Image (spheres, rainbow, N blue to C red):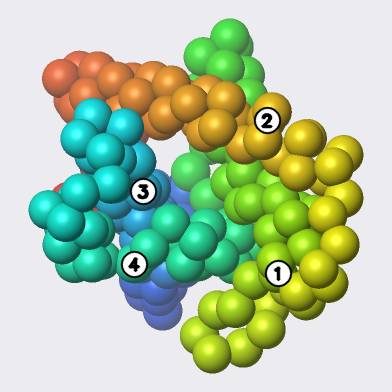
Amino acid sequence: MCPAPTRCPPTTSRWTDTPARYGLVSRGFHWLMAALLIWQFLIIGLWQAVGDTPWVRAVTALGPFHVTIGLYTITLVTLRAAWAAAMRHRRPPRAPGWQGRTARLMHVGLYALMVIIPALGLLRAYGSGKGQVQWGHQLIPATGIEIPWMTGLADAVHGEASWLMAVLILGHMGVAVLHGLKRDGVLGRMAGR
């Protein structure tokens, strides 16, 4: 562990985190998940604005589909959380006071929603009795038996939780822009030099 950015040994890998910046692995997880979630919200916005038209299907075919993004997200957030735990003593420090507590709360909320939302989608797939085939494999078994409480819970919470995540993401982006305007170095920790 490096006590200060200027005292880090020259062998410090650019792949791992340091108190001065996030490493390439942390940044890779962050930006890959950001791209997936932005794509997810774009295709959902298109569906809601235009409807299920051939044009919308053509656009959404350019990237992964809704369920696939959910599965990628739940997998990546699990890997990212494990990586963050491994790097917890090496990472840049949080801001002191209420700003640090707010940032932590926002990040915990985002992580939780990135698990809960896809999990609700999987619960809906199981509860519908139709199952889910992904990448040619039966991920959720097709039982043919509908379980109303599962589909009801998923239907009631999945979409609303997604919009809550959208609000948190917009807030996260807004704070990042403010840090960029202040040129305090916080944005550079995740954005690179």
Is the residue 136 above or below the residue 115 in the image? below
- Callout 4 touching callout 2 (CB < 8 Å): no
Marks counted in the figure total 4
Question: Marks 3/1: CA distance?
Answer: 21 Å
Question: Marks 1/4: CA distance?
Answer: 19 Å
**Observer able to see residue 135:** yes
Give the labeled residue for mark 3.
Answer: 40
**Residue 30: x %, y % from top left:** 40, 54
Specify the label residue 16 is tagged with.
none
- Callout 2 touching callout 3 (CB < 8 Å): no
As helix, strand or loop, the secondary structure at mark 1 comes to: loop
Question: Marks 2/3: CA distance?
Answer: 17 Å
Report whether 185 appears left or right of 58: right
Specify the label residue 64 is tagged with.
4
Instruction: Name the front one of labels 3 and 1.
Output: 1
Give the labeled residue for mark 1.
Answer: 131
Report whether 35 appears left or right of 156: left
**Circle 1 crowding by C-alpha within 10 Å: few under 14, some 14–19, many from 20:** many
Earlier along the polypeptide chain: callout 4 or callout 3? 3
